[in-house]
Amino acid sequence: MAVERGQRDNGKRRSPSMADVAALAGVSHQTVSRVLNDSPLVREDTRTRVNAAIRELGYRRNAAARLLVTNRSGRIGMVSAHLALYGPSMIAEAVQEAGREAGYDVAVVGVLDLTEEALQRAVDRLLDQAVEALVVAVAHRDAHHLVRGLSLPIPVVLAQGVSPGEAMAAGIDQVAGARLATDHLLDLGHHAVAHVSGPRDWTEAEQRREGWRQAHEARGLLPGPELPGDWSAASGYDAGQRLAKDRDLSAIFVANDSMALGVLRALHEAARAVPNDVSVVGFDNVPEGGYYWPALTTVAQDFPELGRRAVELAVRALGGEDRPAAELAQPVMLVRGSTGKNRTR
Amino acid sequence: MAVERGQRDNGKRRSPSMADVAALAGVSHQTVSRVLNDSPLVREDTRTRVNAAIRELGYRRNAAARLLVTNRSGRIGMVSAHLALYGPSMIAEAVQEAGREAGYDVAVVGVLDLTEEALQRAVDRLLDQAVEALVVAVAHRDAHHLVRGLSLPIPVVLAQGVSPGEAMAAGIDQVAGARLATDHLLDLGHHAVAHVSGPRDWTEAEQRREGWRQAHEARGLLPGPELPGDWSAASGYDAGQRLAKDRDLSAIFVANDSMALGVLRALHEAARAVPNDVSVVGFDNVPEGGYYWPALTTVAQDFPELGRRAVELAVRALGGEDRPAAELAQPVMLVRGSTGKNRTR
DNA sequence: GGAAACTTGTTGAGCGCTCACACAACCTGT
DNA sequence: ACAGGTTGTGTGAGCGCTCAACAAGTTTCC
């Protein structure tokens, strides 16, 4: 009965409107609106009657009409890149969850290549969805300038590859994380740590590299060799094969867990035992890391917290605050089987 | 200049409307609308003038107003569960990409628990976004009935855990994939294959289990032991530890790659060599699988194809076709180092 | 007992767009 | 020369909602 009315009606299968509900409940459309918006200015039995009518008709408020007049969509847009990678996908999910908790819908749009126009297209799609604020989680070096240069009419929060103290930016301290990892290895007596890095044009890769460099510098040590990767296990494997040839090498800090898996594999094939001959540390703490052989020592990031801070910044900016800032979240070390004392001599 | 106008104006910072563009171009709002909708009924120089005005004002069409009258959002909704897992996340991305290619926006909403109300909430959120069709990629056993029982006013396409011949459903033939994997092992001379399965309430887990069973039955063989897992590497590890104790066991089909990693690890710890003592096959073809030790033999699914078929079904239903159907996509075997001939005697 | 409150309701305008239609200008063909 | 296209443009209604303004009905207080 209820459903049928909305669907058939007089052959027009128009879905019921507020007027229909009002008619059925014997009130005006405005009263229905008040019930829907939880206004206190409605008598209890009127409210009950209206709610009954709503249920009977299977009425659902037309969001477009509401948006048209209120101009508030309750939606936050998110631009993301490389959603197939662990970090970015975790961030996307975290922001979505944090948004929901704060009462916002989060619409995610992924960009494939990081040209200015691709970014512009993604932003356009989100603006068409009337998002009230934007969270941009793109760690590419150029993304910062590109985004800041867009001069959008809504608040924009950066959520990846940000620097300490930056306004309208939430992030996890990558430099600190990399120092944690490198210090862990140096503390174990290794004299130099090699580094398998991420792509040079990713801010986060650059920051992890910087942390690795700083850790050596702070102790007056010279960093070990650096090999570039592309986040994939395959690139880690390639790097690992080359590093395996250096018999002096006893410690490697790899910029993410996938590449670390490749390194482990290459070392294994080269009969270099981990951790006895070589210690390896990854970054990310993927769920599988504990079951690599040996279990991977790594750096864990608090993505949910990052999501919450990003959304909080957006909400604060929406509330009129001028360019609010947040502190970077701190990663933590997770020591497992792939690291041990230096035994090279 | 252009941007400033839209932002400041006369203190109201209202964004420019069609009327503003029309006034500036010296035409009626309807002509602007025609230009925007690529109507051929506009003289070339008028069109140019209007476009110039649009650019100058930084005008952007209000999607809500348009939606309000057209009642067509150009948006497809997608309900997804367990987006942290490889398969589901690949499907989500594939549907999104296929949707974009077909000219639709895809809005994804994840559900955490698979209660009827959680599903209802997710669907409600999507309906509020005025989606024209729904793609439901939830492999839970009950999801089918739940979704079919919702009686929604828009087409609903199932995209996971579907059966051959089912209408409004796209999928990858899980039974066939599991038979492929099991047959591969039986062909190598193993007399029985053990199975580490996914959760019993996941349709796909059940289907992979069924394929494994069928492969044995077709040869008149008795299947090996079955141990339940939960898709995680940890559960695979537990199962692997138990399976390692059975010295007669020479082949294991694991329902996904993550669990297979855990199995490999457990076998390794128990000094059971892979593939010499035991062969292992996974399912999914995660990018890291080639770098496990040994490289994991697995079954690969064509997710982009699945996405395309799901969207195609939705579009066909939207075009008036009554409950269109599509064939299941076929997975393919990927033989790597973790499987070899039976050498138990 | 009546003005001043509060409570509950109604009415009407208008958000920015598209659609159906009216109309004007300009071509044909007879 | 005039009916009958074709082409380009304008007019007005209305999608479903919220917001402002206002009209009753009900209570309160001196």
Image (cartoon, coloured by chain):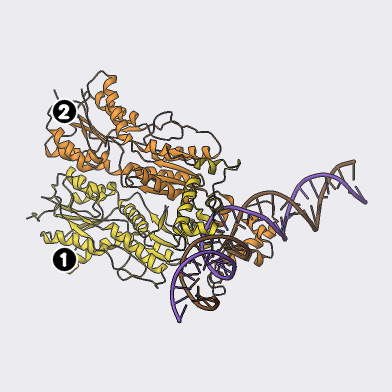
Chain colours: A yellow, B orange, C brown, D purple
Mark 2, Cα crowd under 10 Å, few <14 / some 14-19 / many 20+, is many
Q: Which residue is mark 1?
A: A221
Residue A200, position in %: x, y? 32, 59
Which residue does the numbered mark 2 point to in the structure image?
A: B249
In the rendered view of the protein, which quadrant contains the C terminus of chain B?
Answer: top left
Query: Which residue does the image show at 54% across and 47% down from the upper left?
Result: A15
Name the amino acid type tagged 2. Answer: Leu
Q: SS of the residue at dot 2?
A: loop
Q: Is residue B40 left or right of residue B171?
A: right
Q: Residue at x 52, y 37 (%)?
A: B316
Chain of the residue on which disc 1 is drawn: A
Front-lying residue, A115 or B283: B283
Measuring from the top left, give residue B90's x and y in whole percent.
36, 43
| Residue B153 seen from this side | no
Disc 1 versus disc 2: nearer the observer? 2
Q: Specify the quadrant of the image occupied by residue A221.
A: bottom left
Give yes or no for contact between labels 1 and 2 (Cβ–Cβ under 8 Å). Answer: no
- Identify which residue, A6 or A139, lies in the foreground: A6
Q: Quadrant of the N terminus of chain B?
A: bottom right
Q: Are the residues flagged by discs 1 and 2 from a single subunit?
A: no
Residue A165 horizontal/vertical position (percent): 31, 71
- Which residue of the protein is positioned furthest toward the left in this rendering? A345
Left or right, residue A111 beside residue B234: right
Name the amino acid type tagged 1.
Answer: Leu
Cα distance between the residues tagged 1 and 2: 52 Å
In percent of width and height, residue A44 lies at 44, 58
Circle number at residue A251: none
Circle 1 Cα neighbour tier, 10 Å, few/some/many (<14 / 14–19 / ≥20): some
Q: Is any atom of residue B24 visible in this view?
A: yes
